Image: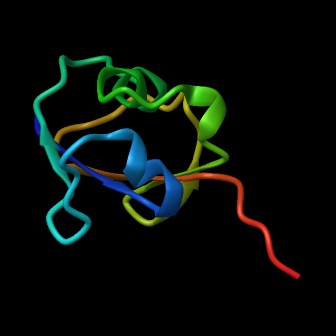
Amino acid sequence: MHVKVMLSTTLRDLVQGYNPHVGIDMEPENGTTAGLLAEAIGIPPAEIKIVMINGRSSSLAAVLNDNDRVAFFPAVGGG
């Protein structure tokens, strides 16, 4: 199975060598969740506030499928 992982803002700093223009290509096992994927690349799930899979809001518990595009976002603030 192949998935593409994209990271936003401060989460990028948690993955050494992360290139935001390319993302991370991964080959997780069938049945892998978004949360397990995050842990596999060194991002603590508690740091993730928004999960998008194929452009749709999802959760860390979502089971991934072949060719999914997964994006992780930290808490967003503004004022």
Q: Is residue 39 above or below residue 5?
A: above
At 31% from the left edge and 17% from the top edge, which residue is drawn? 31
Q: Nearer the viewer, residue 49 or 57?
A: 49
Task: Say whether residue 64 is left or right of residue 44.
Answer: left
At 60% from the left edge and 41% from the top edge, which residue is drawn? 48
Q: Residue furthest bottom?
A: 79
At 71% from the left edge and 64% from the top edge, which residue is drawn? 76
Q: Is residue 17 above or below residue 28?
A: below
Locate residue 65, reporting x and y percent.
27, 37
Task: Say whether residue 2 is left or right of residue 40.
Answer: left
Locate residue 20, reporting x and y percent.
26, 66
The image quarter in which residue 46 lies? top right
Q: Nearer the viewer, residue 16 or 27?
A: 16
Task: Say whether residue 10 is left or right of residue 42.
Answer: right
At 57% from the left edge and 28% from the top edge, which residue is drawn? 45
Which quadrant, please, contains the N terminus?
top left
